[in-house]
Amino acid sequence: EPEVTQTPSHQVTQMGQEVILRCVPISNHLYFYWYRQILGQKVEFLVSFYNNEISEKSEIFDDQFSVERPDGSNFTLKIRSTKLEDSAMYFCASTQNTGELFFGEGSRLTVL
Amino acid sequence: AQSVTQPDIHITVSEGASLELRCNYSYGATPYLFWYVQSPGQGLQLLLKYFSGDTLVQGIKGFEAEFKRSQSSFNLRKPSVHWSDAAEYFCAVGPMDSSYKLIFGSGTRLLVRP
């Protein structure tokens, strides 16, 4: 069964460092998303991406964040200069156009 | 603005007992509705979804949910809980706009007593 895969599963970084989280969405899907879940809290929408551009972003998704689909298969989330409060689980998701999102297992980011 | 409310932060039930997790939403039209389950340290697994049609939907692991438009609710039920059901449960609403994004509730943590 096709699935969304994310790497790394866990990354530890120093405050101020750049981080790139990678996702491989399901191959025939058209819409891609990043969500964030701070430990013990709800899952929050960060950004949606369609047709090679951001279609919607939340207020959390400030200038420190960027997304890219560099090669037609990967979908990346970059945090330019990490802050302590960026520590969270980051989930990638994709959908064809049915409204049902398929989530990856998540990438846990720890900022020290 | 769309929102999802899960009023119960924690629920504890005995194994074999029935379960109902509450979810209320605020949205201007009929949304897509979902329940996801998350085991500790794991990703989000879809339990069931409602798009249209029959308001009682069946999902995996013996779960079901009922959409009640008049109450703006989509409560999750299971007639007999198993210890392996202990997890965090998230209700989500999908606006029927071009982004298809989901908005999640704050979650309900289910504890199962042996």
Image (cartoon, grey):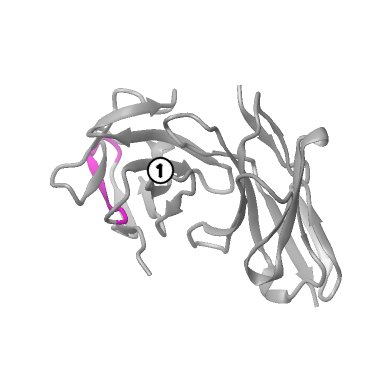
Task: Look at the numbered disc 1 and give the secondary structure of its residue.
Answer: loop
Q: Percent x, y for residue B82?
A: 74, 75
Which one is nearer the viewer's eye here, A103 or B41? A103
Q: Residues within 10 Å of mark 1 (few under 14, many from 20)?
A: few
In the image, the segment drawn in magenta is A15-26
Query: Does the magenta-highlighted stretch encompass residue A54?
Result: no
Q: Percent x, y for residue A58?
A: 44, 26
Amino acid type of the residue that numbered disc 1 sits on in the rendered structure? Asn
Q: Does residue A40 appear to the left or right of B109 in the view shown?
A: left
Rendered residue at 37%/34% (across/down): A48
Q: Looking at the picture, does residue B5 appear above or below residue B28?
A: below
Residue at the spot of label 1 = A97
Rendered residue at 66%/47% (across/down): B107
Residue B67 found in image quarter: top right
Residue A107 found in image quarter: bottom left
Which one is nearer the viewer's eye here, B31 or B17? B31
Query: Does the magenta-highlighted stretch encompass residue A21?
Result: yes
